[in-house]
Image: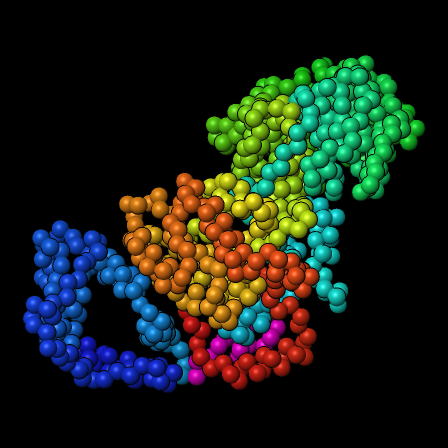
Amino acid sequence: MRASLSKSDNALSSNTNVINSRFKRHHSIDDDYPVISSSLSNDEKKIHVHFHPDLISSDHRVPLLNDSQQQITFQKSSFSSELVRVVEWFHQLDSRQKEVLLRELISSCSGSQWHLLSLLTADNWHRNCPIDCSDPLAQLPFDVSFHILSLLDPISLTRCSHVNKLWYYLCSHPELWRKLATQKKWSFSSAILDQQQIESHTNEQDKPQWKQIFIERYRLRSRWLSGRCEVKTFHGHIEGVSCVQFDSQTIISGCTDGTIKVWDMNTTNEIITLVGHSRSVRCLYVDGTNEVRLVSGSNDHSIKVWSISINQTWSKCACKLTLLGHTDTVRCLVVRDDICVSGSHDNSVKVWNLTNGLCLRTLVDHTDKVLCVQFNWDFIVSGSTDKTIKIWRYLDGICLRTLSAHNGSVTCLYFDQQQDLIVSGSLDYDIRFWHLSTGECCQKLDWISKEGHRGVIRTLKADSWRVVSGADDKTIKVWDIRTGVRLCTLKNHTDGVTCLSFNDYLIVSGSFDGSVKLWNFRSFLLLIFLKNMREYKIVVLGSGGVGKSALTVQFVQGLFVEKYDPTIEDSYRKQVEVDGQQCMLEILDTAGTEQFTAMRDLYMKNGQGFVLVYSITAQSTYNDLVDLRDTILKVKDTTDVPMVLVGNKCDLEDERVVGKEVGQTLARNWGSTFLETSAKQKINVNEIFFDLVRQINKRTPVNKDKKNKGKNSGQMANTHTSSSSGKTGFDSLQADQAANNQRDQQHCCVLL
């Protein structure tokens, strides 16, 4: 045993010699450990240590372990002698038990112990490094460092920015984020929306803030993948909604009662009702900005062209043209420039000139009703009740190919010549993918193998990376157009979904239930602020995996989503009423405390109230909050900060490791509110944010806030940009000088 101790001491001495001067300044290790003396009796000197269950196995009993009590007793006679026993006991554990013990010990460490651990482990990680080991990026030419960083994915790039100041500076280079933001995966499907977003994040020097642009695109795509969106409902139709279209400010819907309604997208108010068709309106197409051109088809066999003008004070509409030629219901139509292609229950497809109302050609080859049609300047593609899809040449109307595989009527379709793809939905509940060039069916999405729809597919739209479909099963599903993987399912309608339209930000859908719904994946774009409504800036902080996003989404949308991509930053807005007062809450859901620290201080600076979240199933997440609160107080430069301490996942009582009384004690010491919550079961979720609003009101009364409103207006917008974009200006001369300065200062390995 003494020999073992001697070896340990020698190893410890050897390790101490290689610890650099920074370690020696903070930690000194004596060769002879002092003996702990005490005047207590032997019984009073006993310390009982309870072990994690994983440390105890039936076939591996530790000599110092009492089987019945599962505890060991240390006599505090001498630190050195007790150390021998602990080391000997540790060596008798198997690998799994050692890992569990280390996890328990590390979770109980404080800041100084963490510092010691980082320095000790650094020697092992870099054992083979040269004596003058230093930051690798600091030693490389800028172009080489830049190329290395350009190969990283966005999450890795953001994590690298936290290594040190030089890495942060390099990782914030706008060119890195421009390359990411302009990749096909992150670009918008609409070139117009893509350019509009870039222009909205261009500074006064006409330089796009590429990091902010990318983060917004990353956040938007994450919401599509998880189905996280705000839903607005438009009521007014007395019968089922058969078709919908929308532009930047308005939604237009057609109904089986023969009316067309125009809605204000922001307020959900009805702007105007168009009455002209004598029977059900079955299809719509809208384009234009200041003066909207609307084309509609109906069961009365006609197609009407409308002109609609809308501004803040007045609106007008007029039917400019009526196209007559079909002998039965006009079921579908699509418009490009001044050309309209329509399909009808009379089994025909017609091509129209909208300037003079003339029918240019009629395509007749289907043997039953035409239910859907799409076209570009090369092809017209139509689907029919005869269960076929036909591909026609646009110029002369010749049928080039007939596709047959569906077991029911083809109710909807989309085609993209660039992707060589046709996507179709049917009465047989299936969605099929076809090669446009060969007519081969390459994939089928059904409810058995692909978690598809369990009802008739009524509507389907697609773009460069996703397919959005609606069906009689009351759901909307989003699919990956390349793989056919279901990305999310949206549920809010109370009857079958009959029609939909979407862009990169929104889905608009109509249903047999008579409602029109707006699914907003970028909700902060379309919020209307009530007059004199006070705004509250709330920041949600905590370690990764504690449920910050789950709590926020549950509060804002009333949904529980179990799986999330790593959060960089998510921004939500929600209007609530607290104590009779209308409030607009802007909630920032941040990354874990171990990630994206460069952004965190900016959140703290501009936040008015803070939600500090830990998981009752993880002691380390509780320990992290002490330092986090200290940082908030330091950044805010005050000890009086509205704050709520939240112990999340209280539904996992069997896995609890942090007692409720522990959280209550900490909150009492801080002078803050304490709540235990469950995002899954929606326990105390609303109470978190309502309590925080009350705390903010108490510290900053409403009247005082109104006086400061002009001074503080726009602050959150600036905060949003700062917290996401970091340093984006990068002059080459200044960059070289800054890099040189950093190289002079950086002479240490990267801390892992």
Q: Position of residue 322 (x, y in %)?
A: 87, 23
Closer to us: 91 or 704: 704
The color scheme shown is rainbow
Q: In the rendered view, does 18 fall on the left or right side of 142? A: left
In the image, what residue occupies the spot 71% across and 20% down? 256
Task: Indicate the quadrant containing the C terminus: top left, top right, bottom left or bottom right.
Answer: bottom left
In the image, what residue occupies the spot 89% across and 28% down? 320
Q: In the rendered view, does 437 fall on the left or right side of 633? A: right
- Residue 145's place in the image compared with 723, above or below, is below
Which residue range is magenta in the image? 132-152
Residue 142 within the magenta-colored segment of the rendering? yes
- Res. 116 visible in picture: yes
Residue at the left extreme of this rendering? 42
Task: Indicate the quadrant containing the N terminus: top left, top right, bottom left or bottom right.
Answer: bottom left
- Residue 532's place in the image compared with 731, above or below, is above
The image quarter containing residue 247 is top right
Q: In the rendered view, does 138 fall on the left or right side of 515? A: left
Closer to us: 672 or 211: 672
Residue 485 within the magenta-colored segment of the rendering? no
Closer to us: 248 or 418: 248
Q: How many marks?
A: 0
In the image, what residue occupies the spot 27% across and 61% down? 104
In the image, what residue occupies the spot 64% across and 19% down? 409
Q: Position of residue 39 (x, y in %)?
A: 10, 77
Q: Position of residue 279 (x, y in %)?
A: 77, 17
